[in-house]
Image (cartoon, coloured by chain):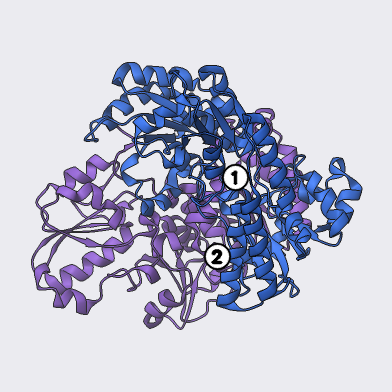
């Protein structure tokens, strides 16, 4: 049955993705929920919650708030918070509750701006989609709203879009910056160890690299607005196996390999496996896939059954998050762990490969 | 940036419960999901939230019917071995506005059964805010599932929206987990203990006290290993309710199964514990001799004070106690409670008033107030009690006191001071 998970647990949802993008930007983020969604975000999908402070709150909706549509109360509570916490903007992140009662998020955005005097972005997530959907929305809206001024280009400045713990398994940007050091002298990971100021100065970048498909739409926006080129890529960081590890693993030579992850990390692994071990590699993802970066045979996966079917197509090796192990129990080849935080919730620092 | 809001016990008591400051009333502000209290904010989160609680029936499985976001943190329960017991029917955006998925639930139950080697005792159907708003008739859905599969189904309502209602999610789930019990001949020498999802700590005096009163079998859902054992709970002559969240479940059992109940409260003040046991003895017609247990508790407290003095404490709410009652008890034992992180309600305001008399300058914070993100730990605090207090006062000796073996009565007091003693021996005074 479509939508029935018998072996897996749900992946990171769209509201988590949106919050992940906004987390370090210095705004007040309100998850428009009763408490459970905020608990999921703060207690599971946002590992920075225990390391870096962020003004991320639950609207604390109660049944009568939802039934009566008390938008004014929500705005009043938001205005109260702006008196208590310094912030440059506010954001409202949707969940199933506003989706069921058809909250007009655009109207909430306008009401909040009027009441608080701060820019507000409301993101129409509903908890039913995956984190990449929420990330794409958030990246696009934040650059659209705040990256307005055309500044002189700074030679060697590289802007990275997509650096969230959900996509990278990292809670800070040091490994990503180190991996891209050869491509620029000043590297900015938007939303990771950088705030709204860098978003405003995005036009200074000489080039934008989207490290996940969810960053492409914002990268295109910046390119159209300021003229800098953009490309897709992924830093050579854990959990990608090092060149040495691939070379020393004789079993991989010439094998048929399936890589399951977010598309750009999977593509980066494919490039390595082809170059170093002559493998024939197919990429599959439960998350969104950009057509421009897909090859023939690459697949978007929609259900547990899709993966079971794909695994039965004669692959020798599958790289995938350990959580997929329960589905792939019957797979006769070799299963190599490729952790993905948005699936299994493991950070790179906790990964032992 | 505003400092973390607090009010002293004296000010709070003077103002009265009707004039609770806005920062202590969670309906009047946004909710801060303090890293210290995440499980408090989400009824499906860590510890025994609705999801894990729903699976306390031996041999049960759960189908979570919800958007993906509601089941995301269930992966946290993997390490506890729950993977094989959780199934998910994920809802899409059309589902949540039309409710069309309701018709698919029986078929989903049938399909998940094909994954299992043996049929489960029950399929718990866990629903969320979506169904709270759509008004789904879950009793009817459960009947439809039973008709199609022959396996019983019961609802688990993870309705975060109704957390402050008369019957909140944790009360509803307690009612659900006893709902499969069926009437049978009751035995005069058997009783149930209701209130927690795990059993009381095995050294708790309530077991020998009840035995001394002629009770041969004491059952708790947390210690039932099989569904057969669970079913025997309906043989009880009476139930003891140790947590008010189980009151609705006990009332339901009284109505359906004819099992009356006696409600006790978890307290940490020795006089109150003694008084409660005396009243229990009267209710069941037996004299309960508590004196050795009281003496043991007094001895543990005295030994702790001898060794470690009376340190200044911070008391949180992520613990197996009521923060205010426990703070009052600690104050009466001679300790100074400088700070409490707790949720003031009508029920525990009586402790606030008493605390105002004996420790008027105790500062009361709300973990849920957004201003708590600016909380700076006070240097005067020497030790912390509660997982949240330990989080705020990292580096100081502390006890989380939120384990699964439930403290109660005099044994609760000795457990606390034994744990505190160990913490001081390991870390020294803060």
Residue for badge 1: A35
Residue B78 left/right relative to B366: left
Identify the residue at horizontal 37%, vertical 54% (top origin).
Answer: B79
Number of residues whose C-alpha sits closer than 10 Å to that of mark 1, classed few (under 14), some (14–19) or many (20 or more): many
* Chain identity for the colour blue used in the image: B
Q: Earlier in the sequence, mark 2 or mark 1?
A: 1
Q: Where does the image place residue B371, in percent across and percent down from the top left?
A: 73, 59
Q: Quadrant of the C terminus of chain B?
A: bottom right
Q: Where does the image place residue A127, in percent across and percent down from the top left?
A: 48, 42
Residue placed furthest toward the right: B14
* Chain identity for the colour purple used in the image: A
Q: Where does the image place residue A122, in percent across and percent down from the top left?
A: 61, 47
Q: Where does the image place residue A212, in percent across and percent down from the top left?
A: 38, 60
* One can see residue B287 in this view: yes
Residue for badge 2: A50
Residue A258 left/right relative to B129: left
Q: Which of these two is toward me, A288 or B122?
A: B122
Give the number of the disc on residue B16: none
Q: What is the chain letter for disc 2? A: A
Identify the residue at horizontal 47%, vertical 31% (top origin).
Answer: B177
Residue A307 left/right relative to B323: left
Identify the residue at horizontal 27%, vertical 70% (top origin).
Answer: A353
Q: Is residue A127 above or below residue A259?
A: above
Tag 2 secondary structure = helix
Same chain under badges 2 and 1? The reply is: yes
């Amino acid at each position: 049955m479509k939508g029935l998970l018998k072996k897996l647990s749900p992946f990171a949802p769209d509201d988590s993705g949106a919050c992940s993008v906004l987390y370090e930007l210095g705004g007040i983020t309100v998850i428009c929920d009763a408490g459970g969604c905020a608990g999921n975000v703060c207690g599971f999908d946002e590992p920075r919650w225990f390391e870096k402070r962020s003004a991320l709150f639950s609207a604390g909706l109660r049944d009568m708030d939802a039934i009566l549509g008390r938008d004014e109360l929500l705005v009043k509570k938001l205005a109260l918070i702006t008196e208590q916490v310094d912030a440059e903007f506010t954001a409202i992140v949707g969940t199933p509750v506003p989706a069921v009662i058809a909250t007009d998020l655009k109207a909430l955005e306008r009401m909040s701006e009027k009441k608080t005097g701060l820019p507000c972005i409301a993101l129409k997530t509903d908890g039913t989609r995956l984190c990449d959907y929420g990330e794409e929305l958030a990246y696009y809206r934040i650059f659209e709203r705040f990256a307005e001024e055309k500044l002189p280009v700074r030679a060697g400045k590289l802007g990275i879009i997509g650096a969230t713990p959900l996509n990278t398994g990292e809670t800070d940007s040091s490994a990503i910056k180190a991996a891209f050091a050869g491509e620029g002298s000043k590297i900015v990971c938007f939303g990771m160890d950088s705030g709204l100021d860098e978003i405003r100065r995005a036009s200074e970048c000489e080039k934008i690299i989207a490290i996940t498909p969810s960053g492409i739409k914002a990268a295109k926006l910046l390119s159209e607005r300021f003229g800098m080129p953009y490309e897709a890529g992924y830093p050579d960081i854990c959990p990608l196996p090092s060149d040495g590890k691939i070379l020393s693993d004789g079993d991989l030579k010439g094998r048929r390999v399936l890589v399951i992850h977010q598309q750009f990390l999977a593509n980066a692994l494919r490039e390595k496996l082809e170059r170093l071990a002559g493998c024939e590699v197919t990429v599959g993802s439960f998350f969104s896939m950009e057509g421009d970066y897909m090859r023939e045979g690459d697949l978007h996966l929609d259900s547990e059954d899709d993966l079971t079917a794909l695994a039965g197509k004669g692959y020798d090796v599958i790289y995938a998050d350990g959580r997929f192990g329960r589905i792939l129990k019957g797979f006769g080849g070799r299963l190599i762990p490729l952790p993905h935080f948005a699936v299994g919730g493991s950070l790179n620092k906790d990964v032992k490969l | 940036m505003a400092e973390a809001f607090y009010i002293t016990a004296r000010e709070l008591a003077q103002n009265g419960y009707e004039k609770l400051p806005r920062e202590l009333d969670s309906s009047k502000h946004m909710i801060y999901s303090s890293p210290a209290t995440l499980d408090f904010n989400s009824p499906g989160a860590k510890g025994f939230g609705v999801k894990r609680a729903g699976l306390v029936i031996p041999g049960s499985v759960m189908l979570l019917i919800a958007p993906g976001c509601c089941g995301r943190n269930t992966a946290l329960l993997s390490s506890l071995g729950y993977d094989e017991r959780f199934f998910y029917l994920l809802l899409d955006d059309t589902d949540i506005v039309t409710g069309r998925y309701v018709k698919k639930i029986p078929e989903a139950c049938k399909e998940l059964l094909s994954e299992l080697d043996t049929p489960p005792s029950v399929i718990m159907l866990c629903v969320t805010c979506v169904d709270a708003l759509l008004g789904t008739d879950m009793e009817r859905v459960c009947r439809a599932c039973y008709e199609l599969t022959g396996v019983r189904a019961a609802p688990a309502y993870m309705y975060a929206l109704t957390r402050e209602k008369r019957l909140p999610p944790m009360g509803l789930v307690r009612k659900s987990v006893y709902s499969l019990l069926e009437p049978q001949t009751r035995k005069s020498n058997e009783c149930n203990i209701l209130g927690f999802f795990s059993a009381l700590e095995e050294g708790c005096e309530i077991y020998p006290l009840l035995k001394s009163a002629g009770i041969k079998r004491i059952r708790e859902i947390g210690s039932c290993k099989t569904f057969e054992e669970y079913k025997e709970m309906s043989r009880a002559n009476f139930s003891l309710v140790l947590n008010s969240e189980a009151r609705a479940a006990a009332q339901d059992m009284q109505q359906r199964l004819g099992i009356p109940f006696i409600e006790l409260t978890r307290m940490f003040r020795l006089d109150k514990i003694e008084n409660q046991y005396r009243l229990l003895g009267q209710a069941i017609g037996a004299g309960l001799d508590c004196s050795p247990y009281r003496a043991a508790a007094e001895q543990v407290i005295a030994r702790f004070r001898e060794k470690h003095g009376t340190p200044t404490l911070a008391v949180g709410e992520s613990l197996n106690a009521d923060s205010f009652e426990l703070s009052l008890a600690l104050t009466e034992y001679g300790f100074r409670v400088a700070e409490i992180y707790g949720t003031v309600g009508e029920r525990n305001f009586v402790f606030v008033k008493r605390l105002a008399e004996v420790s008027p300058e105790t500062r009361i914070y709300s973990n849920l107030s957004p201003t708590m993100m600016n909380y700076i730990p006070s240097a005067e605090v020497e030790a912390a009690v509660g997982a949240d207090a330990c989080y705020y006062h990292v580096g100081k000796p502390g006890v989380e006191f939120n384990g699964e073996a439930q403290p109660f009565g005099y044994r609760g007091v000795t457990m606390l001071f034994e744990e505190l003693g160990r913490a001081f021996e390991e870390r020294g005074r803060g």
